[in-house]
């Protein structure tokens, strides 16, 4: 079970964390999908959020940013995507 909560990362390695990324929905409210983080880096090449299926990217941007490489859980698990760290909502695993 995943639970969203505020927490402070005490390590630069985000491998194995889950995150939620907003997806543009043209019919109603935007959707939120779960991704698994597989790496972190600095880059100016990433997909903008909310993710637009009709204009997906990634694109080159002016400034270098903290980026997470992620896998879209249950959707495109064979494709690595890049998003700005500040555009994703990190999720912590809760042990029961």
Image: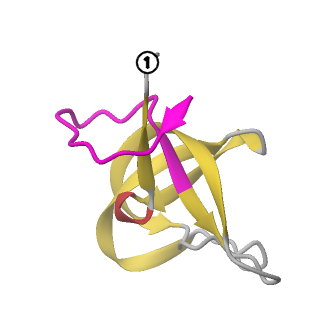
* In the image, residue 58 above or below residue 41: below
Residue 50, picture quadrant:
bottom right
Q: Position of residue 72 (x, y in %)?
A: 67, 45
Label the magenta part by its dominant secondary structure.
loop
Front residue of this view, candidates 13 and 43: 13
Highlighted range, magenta: 1-20
Counting from the top left corner in percent of width and height, residue 48 is at: 53, 73
Q: What residue is at 63 percent from the left and 70 percent from the top? A: 51
Q: Circle 1 sits on which residue?
A: 95
Give percent across and percent down for residue 62.
35, 81
Name the residue located 34 percent from the left edge and 48 percent from the top edge. 41
Left or right, residue 79 beside residue 34: right
Q: Position of residue 29 (x, y in %)?
A: 70, 77
Q: Is residue 42 shown left or right of residue 18?
A: left
Vertical relation: 44 (above or below) 34? below
For label 1, the crowd category at 10 Å Cα-Cα, with few meaning under 14, some 14 to 19 and many 20 or more, is few
Seen in the picture, residue 56 relative to 80 is either above or below; the reply is below
Residue nearer the viewer, 76 or 8: 8
Quadrant where the image shows the N terminus: top right
The answer to which quarter of the image holds residue 35 is: top right
Asked whether 72 or 20 is in front, the reply is 20
């Amino acid at each position: 079970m995943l639970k969203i909560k505020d927490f402070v990362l005490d390590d630069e390695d985000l491998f194995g964390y889950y995150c939620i990324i907003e997806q543009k929905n043209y019919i109603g409210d935007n959707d939120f999908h779960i991704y698994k983080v597989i790496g972190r880096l600095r880059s100016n090449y990433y997909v903008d959020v909310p993710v637009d299926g009709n204009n997906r990217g990634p694109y080159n941007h002016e400034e270098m940013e903290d980026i997470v490489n992620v896998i879209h859980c249950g959707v495109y698990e064979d494709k690595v995507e890049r998003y700005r760290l500040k555009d994703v909502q990190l999720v912590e695993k809760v042990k029961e």
